[in-house]
Image: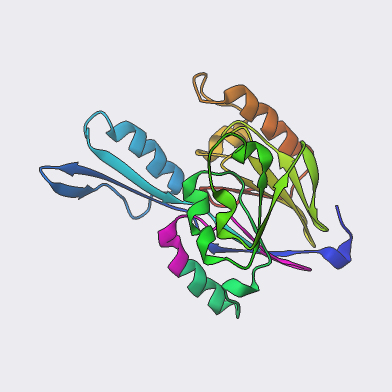
Amino acid sequence: MAGKNLDYRWDIVVPSHRYIFAVEDKEILELNREDDSPAERFLRYQDMKADHPVHGMITWPNTVLLRGPKTVLIDPGILMQGTPLILGLEQLGMGPGSVDLVINTHIHPDHTLANVYFPQATGVIHSKEVAGSGSDWGASFASSRLLEGKRGEIIPGLEFLLTPGHTDGSISVLVDTQQGTVVVAGDTVGPVPAYFEHGDLPADFPGREDLLESWERIREADPVLVIPGHNPPMTL
């Protein structure tokens, strides 16, 4: 990683949130508990499906702002995330035009739809995410860049690891900070923090073997902090 003159400061501009609901007799049933964590809501959403045939979950990720030699935004989120995200940037004395790079950890719409608020930025994603997808992912940006390989530099002070499992081209971003390396892991780490903390997953979890290998690669980076896509930051 880079030297001290390239240290980045990180902020979560909009924290991750999940909203779960069901539809019965043409009415919305809100099934959220005020003190639930995102992981608890995810687990309750899985459990409620049997009793509520018409169900839904609206979710958005942690949107991470990095300020250093470049201003970088990771995973702007869904369209409805745009308004609080822009207001959050304004509180920091910034606007959409202040953002140099938008990095998407993967191509899923809950991480990418709000890219449209940053048309002057350069978009960054791994090539495995767009290959054969038929997606117009890069259309939101003035320019775009596709990452290649298993590890590399995005810009000085920022590296990426290819960490498949959630998707084939999921990446984790390694950020050089004064405190040490921070890893922005997207949905590679999740949806339940205990899975990552204990280094194990249910036997039938999708992408299980790839995820376990990706988690080991993240741990080898010796991060002082890991920021998952849909849970609060965590230490190892």
Side of 118 relative to 55 (left or right): right
What residue appears at the point 64 percent right and 74 percent down from the top-left corner? 98
> Residue 74 or 180: which is nearer the viewer?
74
Q: Residue 30, percent across and down?
A: 24, 50
Above or below, 44 against 140 in this view is: above
Q: Residue furthest top?
A: 203
| Residue 236 in sight | no
Q: Quarter of the image for the C terminus: give it.
A: top right
Q: Which residues are magenta?
A: 66-83
> Residue 3 or 33: which is nearer the viewer?
3
Q: Quadrant of residue 148?
A: top right
Above or below, 204 against 140 in this view is: above
> Residue 236 or 64: which is nearer the viewer?
64
Q: Residue 142, percent across and down?
A: 63, 63
> Residue 38 or 125: which is nearer the viewer?
125
Side of 33 relative to 26 (left or right): right
Q: Residue furthest bottom?
A: 93
Q: Quadrant of residue 76?
A: bottom right
What residue appears at the point 84 percent right and 64 percent down from the top-left corner? 6
What residue appears at the point 40 percent right and 61 percent down from the top-left corner? 80
Residue 77 covered by magenta stretch: yes
Residue 159 covered by magenta stretch: no
| Residue 146 in sight | yes
Disc tally is 0
What residue appears at the point 52 percent right and 48 percent down from the top-left corner? 231
